[in-house]
Image (cartoon, grey):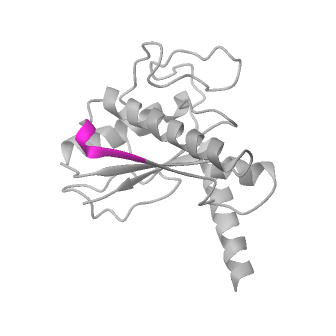
Amino acid sequence: MHKFRQVAMTLAALGALVLATGCASTGSSNGGFAEGSDGADSSALVGNGGATYGTGSGEGISGGTVDGSAGRGPAPPRETVIYFDYDRSDVRAEYAELLARHARYIVDNGVVSVRLEGHTDERGSREYNIGLGERRAQAVRQALLSLRVPSTRLATVSFGEERPAVFGQDDASFAANRRVEIVYGR
């Protein structure tokens, strides 16, 4: 039974990762983000260097989901996971529209609280991964703050490598675990 659960969780996370990377915009617009300087695809820094943020609309269709019971009015965006590059804590430009949708939902619906949970893959020491998870959660927090979300509604926590979304020793598993999850409270 335990092995079946691990396989099911791995397949679900890989599916979400494929959808998240497959749905990234390929147009020339970058949502107002400054381009990164390391040559990596969509590696712009959020909350750094005076970047501005897009305000696209629409609901997310992939990633983790929330139950829709938080706040009033329409349900929050369904996509609640922001993925990160290896050993990086900068939010990629492809998440600008998603973060703008979350910010609008939080502000417009009086959501009481949002917890930003930072995660890492298992590589690195426990202490390093706790710090990296915190930096990732703080990067998403800064992006939401820049979109006028009140700081009193945002909390961050780092789980480091302790709560993997996927169990595995391959690149796809590692990539699925490098994330921040947006969790709505009451």
> Quick check: is 155 in the magenta stretch?
yes
* Image: 29 above or below 163: above
Residue 47 pos. (x, y %): 44, 23
Of 162 and 49, nearer the camera is 162
Residue 24: quarter of image: top right
Of 145 and 33, nearer the camera is 145
On screen, residue 139 versus residue 11, left or right, reads left
| Quadrant (top left/top right/bottom left/bottom right) for the C terminus | bottom left
Residue 151: in sight, yes or no? yes
Residue 42 pos. (x, y %): 61, 26
| Quadrant (top left/top right/bottom left/bottom right) for the N terminus | bottom right
On screen, residue 180 versus residue 54, left or right, reads right
Residue located 56% across and 22% down the image: 44
Of 98 and 137, nearer the camera is 137
Residue located 68% across and 57% down the image: 14
Residue 40 pos. (x, y %): 70, 24
In the picture as drawn, the residue positioned furthest to the right comes out as 170
Residue 57: in sight, yes or no? no
Residue 23 pos. (x, y %): 58, 42
Residue located 61% across and 59% down the image: 162
- Magenta span: 151-156
> Quick check: is 178 in the magenta stretch?
no
* Image: 123 above or below 29: below
Q: Give the number of marks.
A: 0
On screen, residue 49 versus residue 84, left or right, reads left
Residue 36: quarter of image: top right
In the picture as drawn, the residue positioned furthest to the front comes out as 127
* Image: 176 above or below 145: below
Residue located 74% across and 47% down the image: 123
